[in-house]
């Protein structure tokens, strides 16, 4: 597949015509990361913008005591590293490749020039940033008024939206999401995650699938539970 065909498949660039894609191609570099390799650290100065072409990237913060808070897992077509380039202060979070990953990168100078010439891309990026902010706002609301169960339910629903595999009437969360991941998204221990999943299983809202998959039997019932929880 040519790099232009690759770019056409990335939502951020998908509506651009071939001549503009050609210009992006000229400034893009490919960077490969192995599983568990760090891409950058929080507080690094940032001079590169990244688009995930293949693989998965974990965006996370670490407390002074070493506790990890996962902000998101980014996959094919997602972008990151825009914040430090826009507000010109250090990286707001750490980024790590959780599987072998191919990233497309643009330097700070090219990125700024590119956005000035293509305000439509800036608009698309802003839409994604709004989506991230809405998700973060809901997390703050659940941290303030909800309980751990509601935070875990919200986390399962978010994962389904992006990574869920639909099979008939159920949604499957692939085994790549471990209980440790869920605990670091929700901000609790693995034991608490396991206890709540057992409770959701007893309530027939989920069941365990093959391997370590989580089968969501009714997303609607989980949405209802979440609405009633805060
Ligand atoms: P930057 O601050 O340059 O480096 C860390 C990146 O993580 C940041 O840009 C964003 O691209 C990304 N990021 C920060 N917060 C979130 C979030 N809540 N959800 C998804 N991505 C995020």
Image: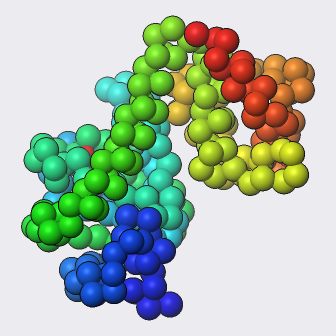
Name the side, left or right, on which 82 lies relative to 164: left
Extreme residue in the bottom direction? 2
Name the side, left or right, on which 54 lies relative to 82: right
Q: Residue at x 50, y 70 (%)?
A: 54
In this view, the residue in front, 181 or 111, is: 111
Q: Taking 121 as reference, is 7 above or below it? A: below
Q: Residue at x 16, y 53 (%)?
A: 85
* Quadrant assignment, res 208: top right
Q: What percent of the width, then of the height, locates residue 25? A: 28, 83
In this view, the residue in front, 14 or 27, is: 14
Quadrant containing ligand 1 reads top left
Name the side, left or right, on which 218 lies relative to 20: right
Q: Taking 45 as reference, is 55 above or below it? A: below
Q: What percent of the width, then of the height, locates residue 98? A: 51, 57
Q: What percent of the width, then of the height, locates residue 161? A: 62, 45
In this view, the residue in front, 74 or 16, is: 16
Q: Residue at x 33, y 81 (%)?
A: 17
Residue 13 visible somewhere in the drawing: yes
* Quadrant assignment, res 43: top left
Q: Taking 189 as reference, is 182 above or below it? A: below
Residue 25 visible somewhere in the drawing: no
Q: Quadrant of the C terminus?
A: top right
Q: What percent of the width, then of the height, locates residue 12? A: 38, 64
Q: Residue at x 32, y 26 (%)?
A: 64
């Amino acid at each position: 597949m040519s790099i232009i065909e690759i770019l056409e498949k990335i939502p951020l660039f998908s509506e651009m015509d071939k001549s503009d894609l050609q210009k992006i191609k000229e400034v893009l570099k490919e960077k490969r990361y192995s599983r568990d390799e760090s891409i950058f650290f929080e507080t690094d100065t940032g001079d590169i913008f990244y688009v995930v072409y293949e693989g998965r990237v974990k965006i996370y913060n670490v407390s002074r005591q070493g506790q990890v808070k996962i902000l998101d897992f980014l996959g094919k077509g997602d972008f990151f590293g825009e914040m430090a380039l826009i507000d010109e202060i250090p990286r707001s979070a750490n980024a790590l490749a959780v599987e072998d990953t191919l990233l497309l990168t643009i330097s700070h100078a090219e990125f700024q020039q590119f956005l000035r010439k293509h305000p439509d891309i800036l608009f698309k990026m802003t839409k994604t940033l709004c989506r991230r902010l809405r998700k973060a706002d809901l997390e703050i609301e659940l941290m303030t008024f909800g309980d751990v169960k509601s935070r875990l339910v919200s986390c399962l629903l978010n994962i389904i939206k992006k990574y869920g595999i639909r099979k008939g009437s159920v949604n499957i969360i692939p085994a790549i999401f471990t209980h440790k991941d869920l605990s670091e998204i929700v901000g609790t221990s693995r034991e608490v995650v396991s206890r709540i999943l057992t409770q959701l299983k007893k309530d027939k809202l989920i069941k365990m699938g093959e391997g370590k998959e989580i089968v969501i039997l009714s997303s609607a019932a989980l949405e209802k539970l979440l609405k009633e929880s805060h």
